Image (tube, helix red, strand yellow):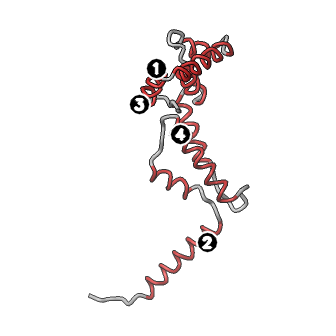
Amino acid sequence: MRLKPGDEQAEIEHLAKQIADVEYDNRVTCMFSILKRFTARGIALSKVQKYDESTDGALAWREMKAYYDSSGNAEIYGATQLVELTKSVLVHNSYGGMHNYINSFNDVCNKLEESGNPILDNQKKALLIANQRLRLLRRLRHVCQQRFHDNQSNAPQQSY
């Protein structure tokens, strides 16, 4: 079971499972002990100590993950990922080609969603296309524009 920040349904299911399943409860408590031992100092300890009373390692882990995945500030992290998304460019000699470009693009989009700053699908499409700087695409666009222009100039003119 994955507990994501803000996912109240998953947290309710986690707590119900912890009450119903003794083995699950033991694993969660063991995880809490491990986290507490290895975060003996610093900011991480305060994140774990929030759950001292419940000894819930899963919730403590979720708290730490949310903090450290977003470098301490989800808004700044989201903005950084958005900048990364706009800087990713596909050119004719990009390492890995289109496959690598799409994978890295999707990775950054997933990081944005996890940080709570998702972008809309139409924005993803626009960025995906706008970041492609292939000469072939520019040439294709030019040919299409040329044909459109030729078709417009060859069309019979109607007089009124």
Which residue is the site of mark 1? 19
- The residue at which mark 3 appears reads as 9
Q: Nearer the viewer, mark 1 or mark 3?
A: 1
Q: CA distance from mark 1 to mark 2?
A: 64 Å
Circle 2 sits on which residue? 139
- Residue at the image position 54 percent from the left and 13 percent from the top: 55
Label located before the other in sequence (1 or 2): 1
In whole angstroms, how far apart are the C-alphas of marks 2 and 3?
51 Å
At label 3, counting other C-alpha atoms closer than 10 Å, the crowd grade (few under 14, some 14-19, many 20 or more) is: few
Q: Residue 157 at what x, y percent from top left?
A: 36, 88
Q: Closer to the N terminus: mark 1 or mark 3?
A: 3
Against 79, is 73 above or below? above
Image quadrant in which the C terminus is located: bottom left
Circle 1 packing at 10 Å, graded few (<14), some (14-19), many (20+), is: few
* Secondary structure of the residue carrying numbered label 4: helix
How far, Cα to Cα, is label 4 from label 2? 33 Å
Q: Residue 61, which numbered label?
A: none
Instruction: Name the residue beneath numbered marker 4.
Output: 112
Spatial distance from mark 4 to mark 1, Cα to Cα? Answer: 33 Å
Identified by mark 4, the residue type is Leu
| C-alpha distance separating marks 4 and 3 | 21 Å
Q: Amino acid at mark 1?
A: Ile
Q: Position of residue 41 (x, y in %)?
A: 67, 11
Q: Earlier in the sequence, mark 4 or mark 2?
A: 4
Say which amino acid is labelled 3: Gln
Q: Residue 77's x, y, as percent?
A: 56, 33
